Image (cartoon, grey):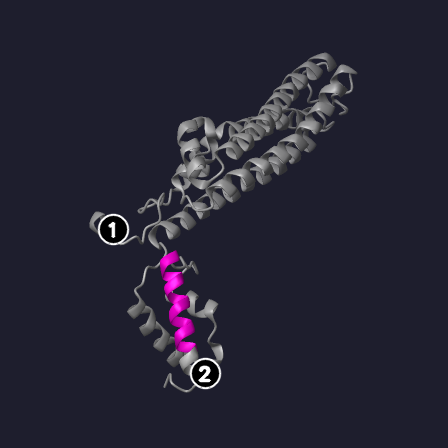
Amino acid sequence: MTATQVESKVESGVLVAGQTPGVVIPGYLECLNSMVTGKWQALDSRPKQGLAGTYFNQNANMAFISALLLTLALDQVFAAFNGELIPFNRGKNSFFDDGTLNDFSLFWYICAVCCFMFSTLSCVFNILAGGMVRDDEGTFVLLKGLGKWAHFSYNSFQIGIVSYAVPIWLGMVVSPIHQNSLYYLLIAGSFFSAIFALGFIPKVIRSVYVVQKEIAENPPTHLSIAQIDAKFEEFLKTYGEEALTLDKFTASLAPTTALGYNGGVTHITQLRCERVFNERCKKLAFGEGK
């Protein structure tokens, strides 16, 4: 989409405020970088419509998950105070005594507790701030003001996950009695971790960018009454009177992409569509539409 095309669409009211044409689908390394930095969750680069609800839902869901993991990490910290943090059988592969294992694991569990707690609290404050600005426009300005701090809860959650995983990996290393068992555990753990971190997550992030590109390049369709009237005739010839409903007719006005995305129509077009639909249906009902 060229700059001239974008300008003409803006003047005609086709492009919705907040949409950014020309979204670039990132490569593999860019997806990993976007995952770490939280760039792929940049709500201030998305369409403003429904932004307030999306902002609330994301923070509410992350607050719930962070609070749940916080209870698990706290349980491990309390176990450390009683000397029960490492319930593994230290085999021949362990180079640490019980005290070192306990203190090392306790450090990472405390980091996980802090990160999950900060993630939960920041999500709560984000929800409160979103409630104060109320609408989509206010949420958009709020996110612009927060800048990179808008990703604080997400980054804290990530660090908490890593911190919680370190003692678990440590337990896998020190637990096996036989050397071969250690190799099997490390291979299995590395294999499934690689599938998740290097396969699934980049695929999800890339899919998000694909959807954003579809939204940016296929804004709501804007039509005049004459154009809608012509589309009505095309709909009748293609599907017949039996399939004629307002929802189906409105959906047929906007083109559907190869991926199945339909940008819908603008509000003005929706009102015009209802008017044309009602007038033409009345004529069809009394035999005047042929």
Quarter of the image for residue 268 reads bottom left
Coordinates of residue 119 in the picture (x, y in percent): 57, 27
Image location (x, y in percent) of residue 259? 42, 59
Q: How many marks?
A: 2
Point out the tag, 1 or 2, that comes first from the N-terminus.
1
Residue 11 is marked as 1
Indicate whether residue 278 is drawn in magenta: yes
Helix or strand or loop: what does disc 2 sit on? helix
Give the class, few, some or many, for how many residues have Cα within 10 Å of label 2's Cα (few <14, many ≥20): few
In percent of width and height, residue 104 lies at 65, 16
Residue 25: quarter of image: top left
Compared to residue 245, the image places residue 216 above or below, namely above
The reply to whether residue 274 is visible in this rendering is yes
Q: Nearer the viewer, residue 212 or 234?
A: 234
Q: Which amino acid, by three-letter code, is at mark 1? A: Glu
Instruction: Please state, as top left, top right, bottom left or bottom right, where the C terminus lies in the image.
Output: bottom left
Element at label 1: helix
Residue 285 got which mark? Answer: 2
Which of the pair 221/196 is nearer the observer?
A: 221
Q: Residue at x 40, y 81 (%)?
A: 283
Q: Position of residue 68 (x, y in %)?
A: 68, 33
As drawn, 244 above or below 196: below
Image-based side of 25 in relation to 91, left or right: left
Q: Amino acid at mark 2?
A: Ala
The residue drawn where x is 64% and y is 16% is: 107
Q: Which residues lie in the magenta part?
A: 267-281
> Would you say the magenta stretch is mainly helix, strand or loop?
helix
Location of residue 34 by image quarter:
top left
